[in-house]
Amino acid sequence: MADPTETPHPTAPTTDALRCLQRVFGYDAFRGDQEQIIEHVVAGGDALVLMPTGGGKSLCYQIPALVRPGVGVVVSPLIALMQDQVDALRALGVRAGFLNSTQDLDERRMVEAEFLSGELDLLYLAPERLRVESTLRLLDRGKIALFAIDEAHCVAQWGHDFRPDYLALSELHERWPDVPRIALTATATEATHAEIAGRLKLQDAKHFVASFDRPNIQYRIAPKNDPRKQLLELLRTEHEGDAGVVYCLSRKGVEDTAAFLAQNGVDALPYHAGLDAATRAANQARFLREDGVVVVATIAFGMGIDKPDVRFVAHLDLPKSVEGYYQETGRAGRDGLPSTAWLAYGLQDVVQQRKMIDGSEGDDAHRRRLAAHLEAMLALCETVECRRVQLLAYFGERSGPCGNCDTCLTPAETWDGTIAAQKFLSAVLRLARERRQKFGAGQIIDILLGKKTAKVIQHDHDQLTVFGIGTELGVAEWRGVVRQLLAQGLLAVEGEYGTLVLTEASGEVLGRQREVRLRREPEKPARSAKGSGKSAARKAAAVADLPEEAVALFERLRAWRAATARELGVPAYVIFHDATLREIATAAPSSLDALSTVSGVGESKLEKYGESILALLTEDA
């Protein structure tokens, strides 16, 4: 759905598409490239759309499907979300349906009959369904308005969400050459953009690339130090009672973190592929339909999630790529209100990711691609410049400092770490040359600090000339040095046990031919933008900036929405988004005509809910 929180731009004289936007969706004007994209597809053109989450991508195929004759066929990667997508459209008066493996034979036959008789506006299918001959024959018998390929980055073979079934979608144009196609994604580098176009045979389509900036999201990366406790502090101080997503790399991490949060009073649920389908579905449904639920998940969770009021996304492990990180953090703040993207990052993350790359399937070229993804992610973590500038640059977009990320709010200092780097690299070199040994960071740091641990004594490491030469730094500081040496390619991880070895570039440092600048972490990383004036009252983002007299009414409207959603068995945002309730609370319309002017109140919702809202407003008065 379109994000109603931004002021739309004035548009051209009324068209069928604009009338549809106003009548069905309740918005006065299109935003950004929406109108161009919609008019292009309505006219029968193919389009490839790169637009950030919350930018209103879905309107770019929903409105053409409503305006063009026939049924819009939407390829969507997660069948678990189709019901909610269809519920949201039906709440707007749109005739929508889906076909997937969750339905019994009678349900599928009913939807097929609706499709053939022209009683549907939109039909959602999973990509694997289009590899079934009976589905193709069904589509042959109906009138298709367009094909929409959502989450199109799933076709990128070395991407973070690759789905093999997406590769077959290039055949759509061969079987139905006169039906326009629109492929959409919220994330793509120039390389991924080109791969999507090539694999879907959309090179000749019109390409639309919007800005990837999400100014309402505050990006923060914290040094990892007991990350679950750090996360709990974040939730208690800034996001108490908020909906959010926490990502962990392993299933065990998911289970342990969800249990930890639950034990500490957070309504947290696990989600990963090892859980049975019924549990996954139930946990996802609670997250979508209830307020304030936190899901702890592997990256298997979240693609296509349409919940607008996710106030934070947290990562307890380092994402494998900037694209994956952007896609996952983009699930926060779809409603345009202040939200947090928080990542805890430490040395062990780097070691673990390097080991995973070395042990991954695929050829050397594949491992080089994985390494390049990791290096870009490390560069984002270690930058002393604006996070947003670095993030947008990865997608080929230039920008200035945002003033709303941790490095802008609390600028990091740098220091000349050349001598520290030389000491650490010398220790690695001496262990390899004099003892023919390789160790991980912990043992080498113990040697530099002059610690006579059992392991140090066992290997006579207290006899090395580098023993005790690094006491000017503490353990945490040395771990920061190692992390940054790995990020800069001056150290490498090797083998099953994550031992450290020198690289070709190490010689430049040891030979005093290269200076090493390192980032010094602030003693207390910035927690929020409270002190900056950028996004006050983050804990109450939904009521921020509301007139005082409208706050109580807004809360009553939310309570009414929650009760209505429970009664209908749909997520609360299907009734109205927070932004629409804010506008109603502020304007306090006294008639249906006045209520119809509120952004997000279309004809169907006015008919369904108008009298109830006016009654609530009258009661409040």
Image: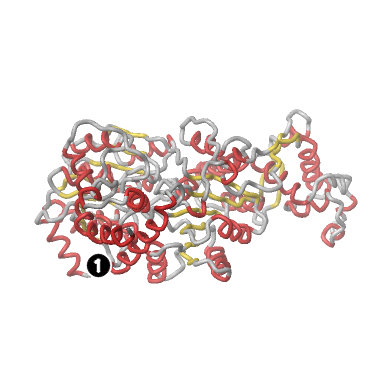
Does the image show residue 566? yes
Q: SS at mark 1?
A: loop
> Quadrant of the rendered structure where residue 177 is?
top left
Against 441, residue 421 (above or below) is above
Taking 196 as reference, is 387 left or right?
right
Q: Furthest-top residue in view?
A: 513
The residue that appears at 27% across and 67% down in the rendered structure is 568
Give the x, y percent position of residue 182.
Answer: 27, 41
Query: How many numbered discs?
Result: 1
The residue that appears at 74% across and 31% down in the rendered structure is 515
Q: What residue type is labelled 1?
A: Gln
* Disc 1 crowd, CA 10 A, few/some/many (<14, 14-19, 20+): few
- Residue under circle 1? 103
Q: Furthest-left residue in view?
A: 117
Taking 594 as reference, is 230 left or right?
right
The residue that appears at 53% across and 41% down in the rendered structure is 534
Against 593, residue 387 (above or below) is above
Does the image show residue 160? no
Q: Nearer the viewer, residue 158 or 15?
A: 15
Give the x, y percent position of residue 245.
Answer: 48, 57
Taking 103 as reference, is 221 left or right?
right
Give the x, y percent position of residue 132.
Answer: 23, 57
Q: Which of 147 and 558 is in front in this view?
A: 558
Instruction: Report the coloring of the rendering.
Output: secondary structure
- Which part of the image, by quadrant, shows the C terminus? bottom left
Give the x, y percent position of residue 387.
Answer: 56, 39
